[in-house]
Image (cartoon, coloured by chain):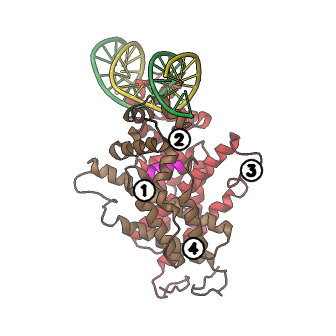
Chain colours: A red, B brown, C yellow, D green
Amino acid sequence: MQLHKDDVLDGALTILDTFGLADLTMRRLATSLHVAPGALYWHFPNKQALLGALADRISARMAEPAAATGATEQVSELAHRLRDALLAHRDGAELVSASYASRHTAGLARERLIEAVLGFGLRHHEAELGGLTLLYYVLGHTVDEQAGMQLDSVGALPDGVSPLFDTPDATARFEFGLRLFVGGLISVAEPTTGARVDAPARNG
Amino acid sequence: MQLHKDDVLDGALTILDTFGLADLTMRRLATSLHVAPGALYWHFPNKQALLGALADRISARMAEPAAATGATEQVSELAHRLRDALLAHRDGAELVSASYASRHTAGLARERLIEAVLGFGLRHHEAELGGLTLLYYVLGHTVDEQAGMQLDSVGALPDGVSPLFDTPDATARFEFGLRLFVGGLISVAEPTTGARVDAPARNG
DNA sequence: ACCTGAACACCGTTCAAGT
DNA sequence: ACCTGAACACCGTTCAAGT
């Protein structure tokens, strides 16, 4: 049986979900696929590239543009979609975050977020920066949230004290940052002196 | 000659600046200090703790509260101070970011940022979330910026094409995110219907 | 084209034993 | 109290050689 790129990624995702990112090693992955470690290097040039491809798979649902109509709703929809995608896999946030930092990702989420930010009436250049800012927020928040879950589940925290990471309001906390971001976008979008459709006036 | 915690951190910082985070290994560090690898484990329980202490040293200048008077100015001052501290050492952003994620840091920057956000009139709980949001932004942006610098200097990019990371306007890009954030803080701080001193009205 | 075998040059961590 | 020696159980990557 021939080994394909997708088989490798399937195996990698299984190890990730079962044992976590620290245990996702080339040797372990090779063993689980019943091949020699060197075999993986025919399909991927190195481990970073493999992890990047895995990050892209985890972020796959970011390929679709936002369905909502308003700019605020689109931003919110995409941010939630990304967070949900990251939370769907053990260490998903850490993996995708690291892949973005090392530039071994296609950057689907980034593209989509920038598109949505464009809906606030910013120019290209500023929408790019705004989209990146949102990406940093979603990744940072979700890495933190997921790290907290791990600590909780491993019992590293004193009994009953999950100070920041009670799962009930993790979503509410996430949404606060989203409102903050949207408020910022609105304030940055409108020209210093009035004259925009639905947005309030700002003083310099 | 006795080995002290601070000697270990000095050595670690030298390796970090000279060779980067990937080459900062316990064995290499031990060699540079003329001790056996095991010696390090008398001073630090494990590598993560050592890196956390190093992150705290890099962030040391965040101990001092902001000197500026306005809330906006304080946030800006602290954000710049943190970014500057991270950029002062090779892979500084990556190291501090990882240490925050793994909770092996004292969280000086976090505390200071939350304090400054409090100046916008938010309640405790919201100021904490706002401070974290700002922390995510500064870390995310600076990791990205520093990673770009690395790629540039290693010549991994086609000649003359430093698409996002021309050092000239990296600071300007950073400040755009800051304005975005401050705008968001203002919009979140003011009660839904008018009645705040210097801030504009928002429609729900 | 795709993979194995075997090596190269490393890791972090532990722990008895020394001083 | 502080450190060495030596081991344990791993890593990522390369590459001649096989099919």
> On the image, numbered disc 4 is attached to which residue?
B185
Q: Amino acid at mark 1?
A: Leu
Judge left or right: residue B190 versus residue B52.
Answer: right
Chain letter of disc 4 in the image: B
Q: Amino acid at mark 3?
A: Val
Q: Nearer the viewer, mark 4 or mark 1?
A: 1
Percent x, y of residue B16: 38, 45
Q: Nearer the viewer, mark 3 or mark 4?
A: 3
Residue A200 placement: quadrant = bottom right
> Which of pointers 2 and 4 lies earlier in the amino acid sequence?
2
Q: Amino acid at mark 2?
A: Gln
The numbered disc on residue B48 is 2
Q: How many discs mark residues in the rendered view?
A: 4
The numbered disc on residue A161 is 3
Percent x, y of residue A162: 72, 51
Query: Label 4: few (<14), some or many (≥20) within 10 Å?
Result: many
Residue under disc 2 on the same chain as residue under disc 4:
yes
B152 vs B125, nearest the viewer: B125
Q: What segment is highlighted magenta in the picture?
A: B93-99
Percent x, y of residue A108: 46, 53
A102 vs A79, nearest the viewer: A102
